[in-house]
Every structure is written in C-alpha cells, then in structure tokens.
Image: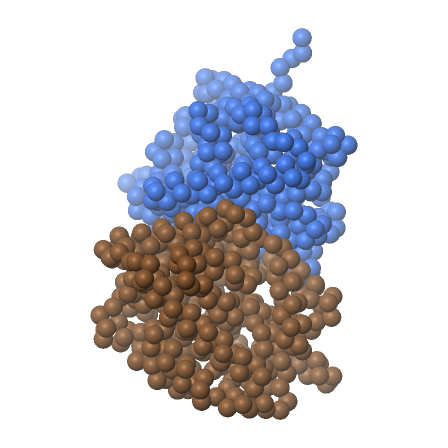
Amino acid sequence: MWDSLSLKEIVDHAKDPYPSIRQWVKDTGKRAVGSTFADVPEEVIYAFGFLPVTLMGTNRPLKVAPSHLPDNACSLARSNLELVLSYEGDIFDGYVLPQVCDTTQHLSDIWRINFPDKYVESYLAPRQADRPSARYWVKEEIERIIASLSKWSGKMITDNDLNEAIKVHNENKMLLKEIYDIKKKNPAALTNKELFAMMKLSQQVDKLEFNKSLKKIKDSLKAENGKGYTDIVLVGITCDPPEIYDLFDEIKLNIVGDTLLVGTRYIQGVVNTGGNPIDALTERHFKRGFFTPIHDDVYRNYEEVKALYRETKAEAVVYVHIEFCESQEYDLPDLKNMIKQEGIPIHVLDTEYQTLSLSHVRTRLQAFFESLKGGSL
Amino acid sequence: MSEKLTSRQLSKKITEEYMDEAFHAHELGKLIGYSTAISPVEIFVAHDIIPIYPENHSVANLTAKKGIELCSITENMGYTSHLCAYARSDLAYRKSGITVTKGIPDPDLFLACNAQCFTLTKWFQVLARKGNLPVFVFDTPEHIMDKKAREEIVKYCVLQLKELISFLEDLTKKKFDYDRLKEVMKYSAQSSILYKKFLDMAQYKPSPISIFDALIGMAIAVYRRGTQECVDYYQTLCDEIQAKVDQGIGVLPKEKEKYRLYWENLPVWFKFSDHAKLLGSYGGVILTSLYVHAWSFEFDLDKDPLVTLAENYVSRFSNSTIEDRVDMAMDLFKRYSMNGMIMFMNRSCKAVSFAVPTLKDILTKKTGIPALVFESDMGDQRFYAESQVRTRIEAYFETLDRLQEK
C-alpha cells in the first residue's frame, strides 16, 4: 500500500493518512496502536506485530473535545482527542500515550476513561534527562511497556523481534536523513512540503513498505541547486498545517536544519545495534535533541539552536509556536532574546490546530524575509 | 508565665521569624532554596536550606488584587496571558519590585517537583536563567493505577532523592545528616496528622470551619513543615476548633447551614471573602477540597525516610489519575456529608483544571448531586465575570432548593 508512493501521493497521504491505514488494517488483519508526541519507543510496538501510528491532530472541526479539554488547552492535544473520539478511533485497537507535561498527563486519563474497551497504556517519560536516575527510569518504562503489550496481546517478544523492528526503523531514519541531506544542498530537488510529508508519514505507516518508496524517491532525486533560496533553521515541536510549508516554498525558503519532532529529532532516533536492544533503546532517549517538556537544562534549547544556525550557515531561524503549549510559552521570551542578542534573525510563527489563518502567517513571513534581505516593509 | 498564644498569633510569629531568618540567610551561612509547595522540602529543612515558596508570595499579591497590574507587566515582557497567574505575578515582581509584602529573598537554588504541576518547573527554569542558578527537578511520574508500576515509581523517586541529597552536599560542601532527617520527618508526620485532624473537623454539623479557614490554616503546613513550631501551631489550632465544636459554634448557625459544599480547584484568591459571604447568604458553606488536603501527608516513620517521602509526594491528588481523584473526592463527600459541589475551571492551573470536566461528570453521576461549574482565574481579575458568577451561584442554589423540596 505504501511501497511505491510518488512524492505527490506522499503529500496526499501525509495530509490524511487514515483512509490508507484503515484499509491496511483491514487487508493485513493487524492491529494499529496509536500514540501522541513524543518519545514512545515505536520499535517496541512494531516488534509485537502492531502498526505504531503517531497521531498528529486533525483539521476537521472540533465537536466533542472542547467538552473534555477547555479552550486554553494545547490545540494539538484537543485536536488529537477529537481525532479519535469523532473521526478515526475505529482504526485503533489500543494506544500507548506518553506523558510529558500537565496536558498530556490529563490527556492519558481522559483517553482511558473514554475508551474503556480499548487498550490504553501510559508511557511515563522522565522530565529530567541529565542524571543517572533518568536512564534507570527510561529502561524501566520500556520494560513495563513491553510487559503491558505482552499481557494485552498474549504474545511474548524476543530480542530478535526487537532487533528486526529496530532495523526497519533505523533504515527509515537513515533514508530520511539521506533525502534531507540532498535537499539541503539542492533546494530545488524537492519541496519543503514534500520532505516534511515524508517525515510525518514515516511515523504513521508501515515502514517496511514505506522505506521502499523512500529508496525509489531518493534514487530519483536530481541535483538541482535552484536559485534565490534562503536557508533557514526551523525550531519547535511540529509545524502544522502542512500548507505552512507551501508558504515556505512560495517564498523560496530552504530548511537546512530543524529541531522538530516531525523532523530531525525523529531522525536522531537511530538506535545502536549489536548489543542488548532494550539498553540501546534506552540510550537513544538521551541522544535526541532538545524537547522542551523533558529537558531540564535551562540553556540547552538556546545552545542547540545557536549551534545549528552556525553549522548550517542559515540566514534566519523560524520558531513554530503551537498555541497554548505551556512549555514553549515559558521558553520562548528568553530564547527569542538570547537568539536576538546573538545577532541571529528570528521569526516566530504562531500556529493553532483547526483555526489557523494562513493569510496572516503569509503576510508576517513575507514581511520578515523582505526585511531580512534589506527590502522595505 | 507568658499567656498562651492563639493560633493566629502563633501563625504571625512563626511567619515573621521564618521570613526574618530567610532575609538573613546568607549572614547565617544558609542558602535559600525556592521550592514548589508540594515537594520533599524535609530534605531542605534537614540540610539547613531555607525553603521559600514563590507561590505563597504570589498568593499574597493576588489576594490583594494586584493581579492585573502584575500580570500586565509580565505580558509586556513577552509572556502570554494563558500562563499561571502565580508565575506571571512573580515574574512581574522580579522586574518591578511591586509587592504588598516585604517581598521574598532571592534564590540560591531551585527544587521543582512536578507532582504538583509542570508549570512550576518551567517557571523556575525562567528564574534560574535570570541568575544562572541550579535547578533540581524532582520528577514524579503520574501515580498510575498499577501496583507494580507504583513500586517502580517509588524506586525511581528514591533514587532521585538520593541524587538531590548529593546535589545539596556538592552545593553546600556539607555532609547530609540522615539522623536530622529522621527528626524532621517526625515533626512533619506529627504536624500532618494534626493538620488533617483540623481539616476533618469540617465533618461536624454545623461545620466549625469553612474552606476559607482551611486555606488560611494550611499556610504553616506549606512553609514550616518539618519543624516543632509547625506541630505546636496545629495543636493550638485543633484545640481552638475543638472548643468551637464543643460549644456548637459553626461557620453558620446549625439551623442556617443548608448546603455543605465541595470545592474543586484552588480558590479565586481575590474573591476569597466575597465568595464566603455570598455563599453564606444562601446557607452554603464550602467545607473542603482536594487542594487543601494536598498537605495531609501520612508519613510512615517505620520506613526508610526516603521511601515514605517518595510514597507521599508521588501520590498527591494533583499527580493522581482522574479515577483516583474521584475516589479521593468521594471519600470526602461521604465523610463530610456534602450535598453540593462547585467545580472551578481555573485558567491559571491547567494541572488541576484539565481534569475538572471529567471529574464533574463522574462525581455528579456517583453522588446524584448537581454541580456548579464556572470558569475564571485564581488571580487574574480580567478573567472573572462578576455578574455571571453571581447569576450562576443564585441559579445553582435555586436548583439545590428545588431538589431538597422534592
């Protein structure tokens, strides 16, 4: 189903992956297990023979989620809740939901209470990452999730199952990285929207199939430098709706680095092979870049953005803020000031699931880049 | 022989002495550790670090209706109005010095325990950046309903408490004294039992205390637990309330106490006394909430102090599942014979409020009691619609009256 997709089909599927996931579940008889952001070890779910699907909101109207989560809750959390309560819940037999902040903690509870007949497990991610206890805890949690999935499914998995799952996932990430590297140097080879559609769909469909599509696409990409592109670094958690990438493409921005969960932070999740797979999955947690709810080093975000900007020789940083994401909202004023003091141009995009007005985003984005290039506002 | 102080006098004396010591901490060779209100502060006390709770300072300013002035300053610094009013008023205080108190001393370090909320962690991170100061995050995963998982969570928390002790030893160049911790724990255990006894006096009819008394009474438990004076204070308070019980003195006279109410969430601080009067005029007394019970610890002194600390802090209502919060609230409904509930959706406190719609649905089903739900903010008056709240309260009591007539 996903093994020979064209770039256009990938973009279409990334926009709405659920019809094909529903069909795949029907055709294969396998179970789909949903998760939300971030850091659920999807390799574990895959090793059980289930399809791990990261839920990333819906653009369809909110009908019931507001009665469970008020309007000052993170718009992605409300959107995901709506997605399963109103639209796509039938696809999933179970969920493994990470808890990384106050909102996701409540979301897990609300989800479990609303799906009494489904499997709903919490993945309790540590909210500190620099002490030995964090390693202990990540390993405990991975082992607990394995035991929980085993109890639910009546199946046991071996190290070999885990290693096979890791291999498929690693291949996916390495392919994405190779394609990203081509794109960085050849901005006209594919659009930002196409690249990030691959990142998104990779976290939602069967990678064993999708990797074949990625390989074909990678091999078909031509070196196309293009002219008039502005290299940027994209910072944040996600960047939605995908039409925002259309805006970047329209004004010829070339994303040469990012910190997104649907981007580099996903690719950074390659797991070491050759040793104990649970140890390797644990170690992976600490290799990934900054994610605001779980990292307690108060300067890490700034250091990473600064280093990425220098390393990629980008011309500006674009920060994607998700409305009502408390973690981002506490970080942003300081981050913005520190970045500005460093002399790095930064533009903040305010996004909100469901209600985003793109014309407003377009105008502000255009104005920022015109001023960056010395044009008048 | 000096006359015995009343609880109010004792509270004032304890608070003044505490703040005086805090303002002279460095002269006394001590450090100031900012702490979340729900955090294993016993470790601080045992290591002679003076705990300061910026939340308490914010409460003083928000109760004095400084919310709009302070929050606006923070919003002009680039922070959104959706953030916790405690945090916003504190960040404004840092910038402007505006406060209705003498202020609070600057921190040397931070202890952020997310059993209360994650907001505090992020807020402390902002403050830490301003002074390049160390932050210790005591991470308490949700107390999920799985026995084995709970055992592992406690192990993880004990590991972290050991890390906290090493962190403090490194910072102060002083060895941690476990015997001193045992002594501190003894005081904490005693004062917690007395504090719970005080709260539970709301079971009497008429109730000698309302939640507003509880909110005033809880202050010493928050900032002086782990000390002898905290034990003395709650002993005095319990004796005073017991005397009221013995004389049949209630918040409202027995014949006027029609509605014994449960309150969900933190209070609307700037409407504190107005709400008490308004509800009283309808025969309503708010007796309790899970919030005030958050400091009713049950430390087991026969256990390793780090284990009993971990078990207690990780299982606070604010870190419990919604199902467990329902059970905790149901226990209060039964024991306190409550016949009404006010569910406050507090824009400032996402950690408590995002559970409220689900909690309300389950509690109304289980008790058969209708709920009054209203949305506002605990400290930012811009989110408080006076006439709307009054109308809803009136309508709610009319509903309760109708139900009682049936």
Q: Quadrant of the N terminus of chain B?
A: top right
Q: Quadrant of the C terminus of chain B?
A: top left
Examine the rendered structure and indicate whether residue B161 appears above or below residue A179. Answer: above
Residue B403, given in percent of the width and then of the height, sits at 32, 42
Figure disc tally: 0
Query: What residue lies at 46% left-to-right and 43% top-to-bottom?
Result: B156
| Colour blue maps to chain | B
Query: Residue farthest to the right?
Result: B27
Examine the rendered structure and indicate whether residue A21 appears above or below residue B349. Answer: below
In terms of depth relative to the viewer, which is nearer, A360 or A258?
A258
Position of residue A193 in the picture relative to residue A122 (left or right): right
In terms of depth relative to the viewer, which is nearer, B6 or A139?
A139
Query: What residue lies at 38% left-to-right and 31% top-to-bottom?
Result: B336
Examine the rendered structure and indicate whether residue B240 appears above or below residue B225. Answer: above
Residue B335, given in percent of the width and then of the height, sits at 36, 31
Residue A55 visible here: no
Residue A17 visible here: yes
Query: Residue farthest to the top?
Result: B1
Query: What residue lies at 63% left-to-right and 67% top-to-bottom?
Result: A305
Query: Which of the colour schemes (rainbow, by chain, secondary structure, one colour) is used?
Result: by chain
Residue A58, given in percent of the width and then of the height, sits at 41, 71
| Colour brown maps to chain | A
In terms of depth relative to the viewer, which is nearer, B168 or B147?
B168
Query: What residue lies at 52% left-to-right and 79% top-to-bottom?
Result: A180
Residue A343, given in percent of the width and then of the height, sits at 74, 70
Position of residue B75 in the picture relative to residue A255 (left or right): right
